[in-house]
Amino acid sequence: MEDRLINRFGKDPGWSVPEGYFESFRAEISEKLPEYKMPAEAAPLSVWQRVKPYLYLAAMFAGIWLMMKVFYTTSQNAVMNLDNPPEHIAMLMASDPDYDLYGDEIYSSSDEDYDAMIGAYDNMNQLEKDLGLTLKPAYRNMKLN
């Protein structure tokens, strides 16, 4: 296969490099390039410029420590009082999950209390009136037995 290609086209590649081209190549390219300007030396850093990143890092850690200290102290100073009802409610709910909280009073959610409350009413109209509710018409005439 290669012999047939050589016979048909010959060994001449069709181009040639002038004599001594690569010997003077580097010198010619260097002459054509513009002169290289050396970059100006950086001004020496002042003490403040050297210390600034470390000072910012220290301030960041101090801020994180302060935030954690504030969060910790506010979570530890939780007292049950009526001046802060959400905190009061959360502490009561966490203390005993069997109690339901309505307003400022705690009602037990036992079946006896539920039966006693339902037994006080004959129908939904009385319950609606006492609790100040507006029920759907389908529920108004229900019997509570």
Image: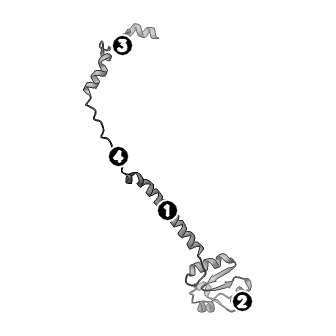
Q: Which secondary structure type mostly characterizes the magenta part of the structure?
A: helix
Report the quarter where the C terminus lies.
bottom right
Q: CA distance from mark 4 to mark 3?
A: 59 Å
Q: Secondary structure at mark 4?
A: loop
Point out the tag, 4 or 1, that comes first from the N-terminus.
4
| Highlighted range, magenta | 116-121
Q: Earlier in the sequence, mark 3 or mark 2?
A: 3
Determine whether the residue tagged by mark 2 lies in a helix, strand or loop. Answer: helix
* Cα distance between the residues tagged 1 and 2: 59 Å
Q: Nearer the viewer, residue 85 or 26?
A: 26
Q: CA gap, disc 4 to disc 2? A: 87 Å
Say whether disc 4 or disc 3 marks the residue closer to the N-terminus. 3
Q: Position of residue 72 (x, y in %)?
A: 57, 69
- Local packing at callout 2 (Cα closer than 10 Å; few below 14, some 14-19, many 20+) is few
State the separation of the CA atoms marked 3 and 2.
112 Å
Identity, as a three-letter code, of the amino acid under mark 1: Ala
Q: Which residue is mark 4?
A: 44
Residue at x 72%, y 83% (from the top left corner): 110
**How busy is the neighbourhood of tag 3: few (under 14 within 10 Å), some, or many (20 plus)?**
few
Q: Nearer the viewer, mark 1 or mark 3?
A: 1
- Check residue 35 for magenta coloring: no
- The answer to whether marks 4 and 2 mark residues whose Cβ atoms lie closer than 8 Å is no
Which of discs 4 and 2 lies nearer the camera? The answer is 4
Badge 4, how many Cα within 10 Å: few under 14, some, many 20+? Answer: few
According to the image, label 3 marks what residue? 13
- Tell me, for residue 62, which label it has, or none: 1
Mark 1, Cα crowd under 10 Å, few <14 / some 14-19 / many 20+, is few
Q: Which kind of residue does numbered mark 2 sit on?
A: Ala
Q: Nearer the viewer, mark 4 or mark 1?
A: 4
